Amino acid sequence: MALLEVQGIQKSFGALKALDGAGLRITEGSFHGLIGPNGSGKSTLLKAIAGAHFADAGTVVFNGQDLTRALPYERSRAGMSLKFQITAVLPELSVYDNVLLATQAHQSPFSLARSRSRAQLHDRVMEPLESFRLVGRADDLAGELSHGEQQWLEIAMALALRPKLLMLDEPTGGMSPEERRVTGELLRPIKSWCALLIVEHDLDFIRDLCDRLTVLDHGQVLDEGTVEEIQRSDKVKKVYTTRE
Amino acid sequence: MATRPSSAATARPRLWLPLIEKVALAVAVFLPLVLRGEPQLVTLATNILILALLAVSFDLCWGYSGIMSFGQALFFGVASYAVALIGRDLDFSQLAATLPLAMAIGLALSLLFAFFLLLGRRTPTVIFVALGTLTGAYAAERLVSGWQYVGAGNGLSSVKLMQFGSYEFVEGADFYFLVLALLLLVYLGCRALVRSQFGLVLAGMRQNEERLAFLGYRVQIYKATAFAIAGAIAGLSGALYAYHQGFTGPGNLGPGLSTTAVLYCLFGGTGTLIGPILGTVAIESISYFLSGSQTVKQYWPVLLGVLLLLVVAFRPTGLLGLLVSTRERIGSFGRRAP
């Protein structure tokens, strides 16, 4: 059974049709890349899946649940986790508190008011901080981190939710080549427990990380397959050579 | 097991807020002794503490939860009318019953507003909530202004004195210390809340509400909870005000007093609990001491407006921002791991 089944998504912004029947299918534990030329609808599709946009038509079924009309917090509780394209860490909170905020997200307001769980959650907070090399910055404000570190912090927050599906929108944007390489290294170990859907312009990064790719163009799926199949696809080559 | 790092940041001293809190408490405790022989100043100080409760209630909304409420006076005013009417019609003013009742009225009314303004499927905008609460306060002021049962435009005077058993609280040191004790309780309760893991959610919500929704928080619930607690505090403040002044009127429900509460907070410094209290002390004291001059009295609202524009433009963190860093203002949340 697919972990995520997205079908026939349509989304327009006024006269602009951003998505025109796009869809994809992700199985548990797979790393899936979403690529395409600028303006092809990649980020819009990711947002429609995460609930930032409601699709005009189409369905989003996740882990057997129809989440098409669910709000972002409902999708998060179902096991989806999104890292935004524009870094959205909480700059006036410490790095530690940013991750704690993610870790405690599914507790009740009453329980949080009593502050009983902070000590218990400590290990769960430190785990992603260690994985993403942020332990030494745990007490610094998130706004004081470099751009690359903020990207890692946001991925760490997204993973602290222990999602079944992690969605990353251009996670290496603005990173140095070395930071990109390290980001790939940091993401690989999650494969054993979490699926990944990633939008990325860096095709080398995507090729090294993903099992399968979906290529979008003009809001529609142009092609779908393994990395090797997409690399051989004439349709994809044509789009990238004429549009990019 | 992973251990907590000890970076330079942990060693940063946090000096100002605890010091300011202790000094403020010491001054407040000894003030009636210093002001012995000046009963009108004790009355002024009591009034300031009562209004400080209103300022704290607004700060819980705006400074901590990002809810721009221009209707805090509504909860204040309705509670003040309620205790005045209970005193008049039922001849009852036992504080052990009327003050909790006033808080319950503030709580219930703010929950009603939260239901319409905050608990929608999608999170509302700041402007929507500001206009909604402003409209509520304005409508309530107009309503009571024309309602004879509640004294219409004249309000309700000769409010029955607040009682504890057979003891009656009149203006003076007893009333002052009662209000101070209640303010201290509210302060400590609010501090426990905003420094808890719940407070961490409020702090995150204030910075990026959308991000929190994607982390799985239903932010409307947190906003409604903070708004309801603030409503209860405003209700308590309104009841004390009616008992202390022996009067309540339409002006205690409307946008005028609501805006004054906003000014107390902005002037003192939002996002700390002591800031709004200091703002109330500063504005009300200056207002009192300058009111001797007819010219100043006439132009005081204009002067106040200009002063606050200057504060907002050049020192958005208010008076407290002169001493307290952003880092200290935000603080930490919950009990740390040993």
Image (spheres, helix red, strand yellow):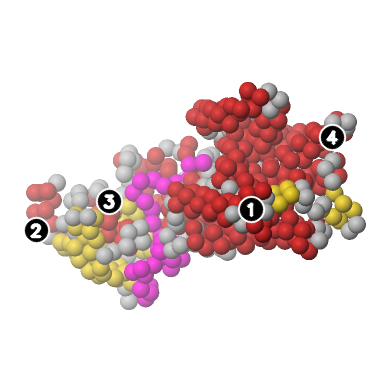
Local packing at callout 4 (Cα closer than 10 Å; few below 14, some 14-19, many 20+) is some
Q: Which of the two discs, 3 and 2, labels the residue nearer the N terminus? A: 3
Q: Nearer the viewer, residue B116 or B18?
A: B116
Same-chain status of marks 1 and 2: no
Closer to us: mark 4 or mark 3? Answer: 4
Q: Amino acid at mark 1?
A: Ala
Q: Which of the two discs, 4 and 1, labels the residue nearer the N terminus? A: 4
Q: CA distance from mark 4 to mark 3?
A: 72 Å
Q: Which residue is mark 2?
A: A234
Local packing at callout 1 (Cα closer than 10 Å; few below 14, some 14-19, many 20+) is some
Closer to us: mark 2 or mark 4? Answer: 4
The image quarter in which residue B172 lies: top right
Could you tell me which residue is drawn at 71 percent across and 25 percent down?
Answer: B292
Could you tell me which residue is drawn at 53 percent across and 28 percent down?
Answer: B306
Asked if A191 appears above or below B282 in the picture, the reply is below
Q: Amino acid at mark 3?
A: Glu
Q: Which residue is mark 4?
A: B39
Disc assigned to residue A200: 3
Q: Amino acid at mark 2?
A: Asp
Q: CA distance from mark 3 to mark 2?
A: 21 Å
Disc assigned to residue B330: none
Q: Dot 2 lies on which element?
A: helix
Could you tell me which residue is drawn at 60 percent across and 40 percent down?
Answer: B260
Q: Is residue B12 left or right of residue A20?
A: right
Q: Dot 3 lies on which element?
A: loop
Q: Which residues are magenta?
A: A63-92
Residue A31 x/y as whole percent: 31, 61
Q: CA distance from mark 4 to mark 1?
A: 31 Å
Q: Chain of mark 1?
A: B
Disc assigned to residue B152: 1
Q: Dot 4 lies on which element?
A: helix
Q: CA distance from mark 1 to mark 3?
A: 66 Å
